[in-house]
Image (cartoon, rainbow, N blue to C red):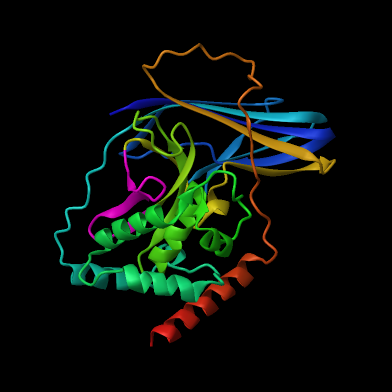
Amino acid sequence: MPEFKIQHITRYTYDGKVRDSANQVILFPITDVNQEVLKHDLTITGNPVVDTHVDYYGNEVGSFTYLEPHNQLIINSEVLVVTHAKELPAESLSAQEQWQKLASLQNIVPYIDFLMHEYFEALPELLAAIDKEKQAGDTPYRTALRFCDYVYRNFEYLPGVTTVETTLKEVWKLKAGVCQDFAHILILMLRLLNIPARYVSGYICPNHNGMRGEGATHAWAEVYLPEYGWLGIDPTNNCVANETHVRLAVGRNFSDCSPVKGVYKGTSGHLLEVKVSVEYRDQPSSEPTDEIDSNNFIKAAEAPEFTTNSYQRYKEAILLQQQQQQQQQ
């Protein structure tokens, strides 16, 4: 039952004075039987009022507007959270029974959102890789672990070679990327296997084993398993996401879980930087202050803007699913 201290600072620096900055933040850790938030302090430049609501996926989302002219905006989230280990699937049902139960979810909300395939230009290559890797007789759980291992073995962890705007086709061609890319590739593969899969944003906490992404923002996948529920799997580290993973939000992909995004009036030139620290609660550290240390910020990319609306993207996904079904006939 580890307890973690997490500080997540987002800093926008603008080329000139801007105003009417309207923002959305998803910086509120999920609370359930496996994760308990003991304390959460959220401070924002100008001390605006933050209105919160729960979105379609169950995430707590905050919204605020900073009206006054400013050339910098800092969002500082400090969390104290305790996590509890989750028991792994017992798999009392046969593989056939489990696949039949998954098949019955194909047209049921909310699973339909987590089974829909995103547009992917290299689909034939991906399907060939799936056919080669999958094993007859595997349960959905074993299949998820098998493809988690596949992504871990076949994709190189290389920070800086991709951004949030990098397409799945580019990641597939590079065979490299970071946690977000690993999660997106794994999710697509599992959905093509008719296993509901969703994207998870959060933090991976120190466990002194040198895990990739340790002590920083992180992303992984969750799969829905019959008679069990949602299980987190981390292809970046080839492991089950358990008590060392702190969940912020879940969704179809990164755009549903972006920690901070917004708009403003003024100069278009701006820089987005992020700094994250994660420690055990009993780890010695200096007391927090009101001043933000300017060191160790990392330049961050922002959530991409879609060139099509959600309905068009939905129609593209339906067409892609129909093409894939025809190929399997």
Residue range corresponding to the magenta coloring:
222-242
Q: Is residue 231 magenta?
A: yes
The quadrant of the rendering that contains the C terminus is bottom left
- For image coordinates 80% across by 29% down, the residue present is 70
Name the residue rendered at 14%, 59% in the picture.
92
For the N terminus, the image quarter is top left
Using the image as rendered, state which of residue 23 and residue 52 is in the foreground.
23
Q: Is residue 193 visible?
A: no
Determine whether, in the image, residue 196 is placed left or right of residue 218. Answer: left
Residue 172, above or below 9? below
Q: Main secondary structure of the magenta part?
A: strand
For the point 56% across and 65% down, the residue is 169
Q: Quadrant of residue 142?
A: bottom left
Q: Position of residue 28 (x, y in %)?
A: 50, 36
Q: In the rendering, at what x and y percent does residue 51 appear?
A: 60, 37
**323 to 155, vertically: above or below:** below
Point out residue 328 in the picture as x, y percentages from the top left corner: 39, 83
In x, y percent, where is residue 301?
Answer: 65, 44
Residue at coordinates 29% horizontally, 54% vertically from top-left?
229
Name the quadrant containing residue 165: bottom right
Left or right: 39, with 163 as reference point: left
